[in-house]
């Protein structure tokens, strides 16, 4: 028996959310005596980087070092992970909830005849059956969910588990798989990706601007603060709708759901649909010139003031801290 | 060209989420139900494709009789006919099985739906349907054009987007800005009343997961306000009290 963890990587490093999934897999294995924790990585990646996955709790890493799997072709990834799952005799698959993770997990549930629970926020409770707690209604509630199948897939919500990097380097085993060409029928023709910036879903701190920022020409104020904090930048829906900011920065019910340690909202009113995307943040700071803005009710700290005055001062104050 | 759009029937985004019966049931009291916002994007794009390509457009929902007004709204927006699989949508695998069963009978070229529902946020049904039918599934799709039998798409990835192509048939989980939400007009609402809405029985009843109890998150404490002329204080609090810097 073993627990298999599907690892995602970007630009040569394993994603933090995947390391969290490994830590979750390790804790699950310890709690339920579920055997070895095996991580599986697909596509080209440095073995040293992969050995690091051991620090998050993997006993072993299986690396399908096939260039064709570099691109995130959903069907091919699902097929590869299914093969590794079956070969390793696993009973549980753990992965991080993400756009790729969701897509792969869904196909795997059908391939493996497994029960799938998404947005998992805690370890399973096996005192009476097998129950897992998951986040629902976009963070507004939780559901204790009983799982009625032998094979289980758990998609873990980001920042829901503590990442523990206290293990040691894991052995990396290269495996060749024969993936039928029929799994490569979607062709990725090009990718536009902002490089060098902190990715929003992974960011530990996020600074977001709303319509109160008045226009895209003022975003340097948001970016300056974000840079000082090592933060990712986000925005409200109208801001991306008008095209002040790119769509992948849109936070909320219909956009990216973030769960950082610190979320700083500037000139955002705090509509319920925006809050739905940020309610899993550990600490929320709101800067708004209107003391009645609903966002203050969801905030830990607030400043009632004009963003154009407060932001430069705040950036300076953060700088002074260093 | 035949398009199927899958519609969820979910609480309006401003609803207060509460539970009854010892936290075992969602409290529908005072809650207004809508077409899932992501499904609404898929539907809007499907209506555009229908007009552009002369396609037929069917909408489907797995749900009990109460979801019919939501399906009628989809008909008012521009779908030609609707199918309701008469069953409680207990989990994503169950729902996917129902959709796949209908799709196998009717050979749709394109199956569209939202990237996720806004009640359970699983984001799984499109992938499951794709796997059950043995066809590609792509999500979250933010642009979708059809040229002959080729689908050209843009998919959102962390920090950017990816452009990709595949042949029909295909399943797409959609999100904005694939199209703008459409509001039904008077003529649409009138014609929706007489468009066909077929009710069918579910295929199989195996349930892989089941919610036993619901829970609300702990209430948030009150906000601590810092004077706008003393931002250094905020930085101190974030460092020493909240310990997030
Ligand atoms: C189905 C549905 C889904 C939605 N999904 C989302 C979503 O995912 N994400 C999202 O964000 N929205 C979403 N919305 C929209 C949402 O309802 C709000 O309209 C939106 O969040 C408002 O954006 P905003 O706060 O930037 O703008 P506004 O509501 O216009 O607020 C601007 C704020 O800036 C403040 N302000 C103005 N000038 C200054 C200044 N100089 N200094 C400081 N503060 C200033 C104002 O006091 C105000 O509070 C959705 C809506 C619907 C119906």
Image (cartoon, grey):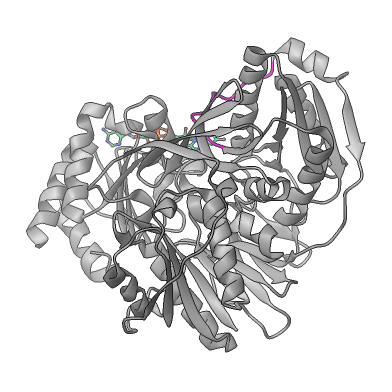
Question: Residue B153 at x, y = what percent?
Answer: 50, 31
Q: Which residues are magenta?
A: B174-184
Is residue A58 visible from the viewing direction of this image?
A: no
Does residue B136 appear to the left or right of B224 in the view shown? right
Is residue B153 visible from the viewing direction of this image?
A: yes
Question: Residue A213 at x, y = what percent?
Answer: 28, 32
Does residue A146 appear to the left or right of A174 in the view shown? right
- Quadrant containing ligand 1 reads top left
Tell me which secondary structure the magenta stretch mostly adopts. loop
Residue occupying image coordinates x 71% and y 22%: B1
Q: Is A91 contained in the magenta span?
A: no
Question: Residue A227 at x, y = what percent?
Answer: 18, 49
Q: Is B181 contained in the magenta span?
A: yes
Residue occupying image coordinates x 32% and y 38%: A267
Residue occupying image coordinates x 52% and y 36%: B141
Does residue B27 appear to the left or right of A82 in the view shown? right
Question: Residue B239 at x, y = what percent?
Answer: 22, 66
Q: Dividing the image into 4 quarters, which one contains the C terminus of chain B?
A: bottom left
Residue B169 occupies quadrant: top right
Instruction: Name the outermost residue toward the top.
Output: B187
Tell me if residue B188 comes above or below residue A15 in the rendering: above
């Amino acid at each position: 028996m073993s627990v298999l963890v599907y690892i995602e990587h970007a630009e040569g490093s394993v994603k933090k959310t995947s390391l969290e999934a490994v830590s979750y897999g390790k804790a699950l294995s310890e709690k339920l005596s579920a055997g070895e924790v095996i991580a599986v990585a697909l596509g080209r990646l440095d073995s040293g980087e992969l050995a690091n996955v051991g620090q998050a709790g993997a006993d072993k890493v299986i690396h399908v070092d096939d260039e064709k799997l570099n691109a995130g072709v959903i069907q091919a990834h699902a097929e590869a992970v299914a093969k590794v799952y079956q070969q390793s005799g696993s009973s549980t698959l753990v992965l991080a909830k993400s756009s790729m993770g969701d897509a792969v997990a869904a196909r795997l549930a059908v391939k493996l005849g497994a029960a799938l629970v998404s947005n998992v926020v805690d370890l399973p409770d096996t005192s009476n059956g097998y129950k897992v707690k998951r986040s629902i209604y976009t963070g507004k509630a939780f559901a204790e969910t009983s799982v009625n199948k032998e094979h289980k897939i758990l998609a873990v919500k980001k920042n829901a588990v503590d990442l523990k990097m206290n293990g040691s380097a894991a052995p990396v085993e290269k495996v060749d798989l024969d993936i039928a060409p029929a799994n490569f029928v979607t062709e990725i023709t090009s990718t536009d990706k902002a490089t060098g910036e902190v990715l929003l879903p992974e960011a530990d701190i996020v600074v977001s601007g709303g319509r109160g920022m008045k226009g895209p020409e003022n975003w340097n104020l948001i970016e300056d603060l974000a840079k000082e904090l090592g933060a990712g930048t986000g925005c409200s829906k109208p801001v991306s709708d008008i095209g002040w900011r790119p769509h992948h920065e849109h936070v909320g019910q219909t956009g990216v759901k973030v769960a950082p340690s610190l979320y700083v909202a500037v000139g955002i009113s705090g509509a319920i649909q925006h809050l739905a995307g940020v309610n899993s943040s550990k600490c929320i700071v709101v800067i708004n010139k209107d003391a009645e803005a609903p966002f203050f009710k969801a905030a830990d700290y607030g400043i009632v003031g004009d963003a154009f005055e407060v932001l430069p001062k705040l950036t300076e104050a953060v700088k002074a801290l260093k | 060209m035949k398009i199927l759009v899958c519609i969820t029937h979910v609480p309006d985004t401003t609803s207060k989420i509460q539970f009854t019966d010892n936290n075992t049931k969602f409290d529908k009291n005072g809650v207004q139900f809508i077409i899932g916002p992501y499904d609404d994007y898929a539907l809007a794009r499907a209506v555009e494709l229908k007009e552009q390509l002369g396609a037929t457009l069917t909408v489907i929902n797995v749900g009990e009789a109460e979801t019919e007004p939501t399906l009628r709204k989809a008909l008012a927006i521009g779908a030609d006919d609707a199918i309701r699989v008469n069953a409680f949508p207990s989990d994503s695998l169950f729902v996917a099985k129902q959709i796949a069963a209908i799709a196998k009978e009717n050979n749709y070229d394109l199956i569209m739906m939202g990237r996720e529902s806004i009640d359970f946020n699983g984001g799984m049904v499109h992938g499951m349907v794709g796997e059950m039918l043995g066809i590609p599934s792509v999500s979250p799709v933010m642009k979708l054009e059809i040229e002959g039998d080729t689908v050209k798409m843009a998919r959102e990835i962390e920090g950017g987007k990816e452009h990709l192509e595949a042949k029909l048939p295909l399943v797409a989980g959609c999100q904005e800005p694939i199209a703008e939400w459409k509001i039904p007009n008077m003529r649409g609402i009138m014609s929706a009343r007489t468009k066909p809405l077929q009710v069918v029985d579910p295929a199989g009843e195996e349930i892989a997961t089941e919610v036993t109890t619901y829970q609300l998150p702990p209430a948030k404490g009150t906000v601590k306000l810092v004077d706008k002329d003393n931002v250094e204080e905020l930085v101190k609090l974030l460092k020493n009290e909240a310990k997030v810097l």
